[in-house]
Amino acid sequence: MRQLNGLVIALATILLSVPAFAQSENGFSHANGNAKFLRCGTRQPTELEALMVEEHILKMRGKFKSNQKKPDKPGKPGDGGGGGGDTPSPNGSVTIDVYFHVITDTADNGHLTAAEINAQIDVLNDAYSGGTGGADTPFRFNLVSTDYTANNSWFNVGYGTAAESAMKNSLRQGDAGDLNIYTANLGGGLLGWATFPTDYASNPANDGVVVLYSSLPGGTAVPYNEGDTGTHEVGHWLGLYHTFQGGCKDGDFVDDTPAERSPAYGCPVGRDSCSTRRQPGLDPIYNFMDYTDDSCMFEFTADQALRADILTQTYR
């Protein structure tokens, strides 16, 4: 972890002092009541937490811009090679090792093949390289290992439960810069959830991404079965908020994603939920950090890539 300055310590102290469910509102409170699946269970940061993170990002953004002509050498988060603290990471220069944990029940429901797991990694690399039509980013993903665990309690894991804690404490591998992905039959109808980079210092064992096993490419969680639940949750793991975070007032603290009053579902072309607040731009329904169908999502923006880079360098 880099640059563990006073702001980082203060933020970690806040997170340690507030119970997980009291810290903020969870994504599923914004879910579409008519949908079969609830899009995301990742907690939304409190206003205080978001403002503290934004204060730090604004300082770092100025340093990044002044150093954009001096790119650092490639590497991976946490190894001293990628980013450099106040220098932007070149696109494709940060390799994130992935540890994939497949949870099944004792009847082997939830089993995933190597081909299905590799397809999910391919989806991540396409999305984060701009291969689907959005901005390129510094991040690429390298599958290091896959393990399988049959456990009925973990298979039906819920957000913030004892089962989640036991599962992660038992299986998590790597350090702050390594991505652990857990697949299971998530409780509450959720498609997935993740931790933020700012969460790591207060609870390293909880770090990672949890997704519904049937949301992987070719799965049965239609219309969320092209692997972009993984793309979305990894976005949170890298520090991105939902595009509707903060609504029409504050937005998601990313300059090139138009403000959005509420999550979008399906693929509502032309939606403009903040028009009455004189916020420019149509809703970012094609963005991976919205709630639209997988077939509708195809992009991150350049400022999202920069934000993820800053947060990853600072907290991972």
Image (cartoon, grey):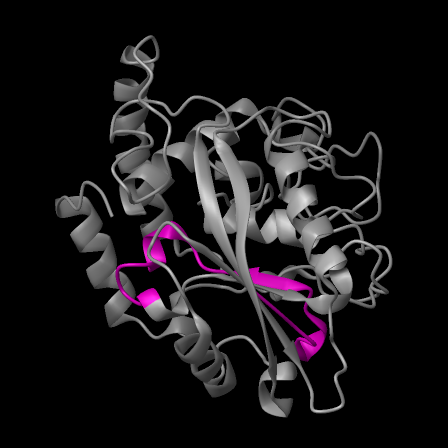
Q: Position of residue 127 (x, y in %)?
A: 65, 36
Q: Evaluate whether residue 133 shows in this view.
A: yes
Drawn side of residue 163 relative to residue 300, left or right: left
Q: How many marks?
A: 0
Q: Tell me which corner region of the image, top left, top right, bottom left or bottom right, holds residue 166.
A: bottom left
Q: Tell me which corner region of the image, top left, top right, bottom left or bottom right, holds residue 101.
A: bottom right
Drawn side of residue 60 relative to residue 251, left or right: left
Q: Position of residue 48 (x, y in %)?
A: 32, 52
Drawn side of residue 52 relative to residue 151, left or right: left
Q: Which stretch is magenta?
A: 182-204
Residue sticking out furthest to the left: 6
Q: Position of residue 258 (x, y in %)?
A: 61, 29
Drawn side of residue 250 relative to residue 230, left or right: left
Residue sticking out furthest to the top: 69
Residue 184 lies in the magenta stretch:
yes
Q: Evaluate whether residue 255 shows in this view.
A: no
253 is higher (above) or lower (below) than 122: above
90 is higher (above) or lower (below) than 126: above
**Which residue is at 68% across, 33% downward?**
284
**Which residue is at 69% across, 64% downward?**
191
Residue 201 lies in the magenta stretch:
yes
108 or 225: nearer the viewer: 108
Q: Position of residue 314 (x, y in %)?
A: 28, 40
**Which residue is at 83% across, 42% downward?**
295
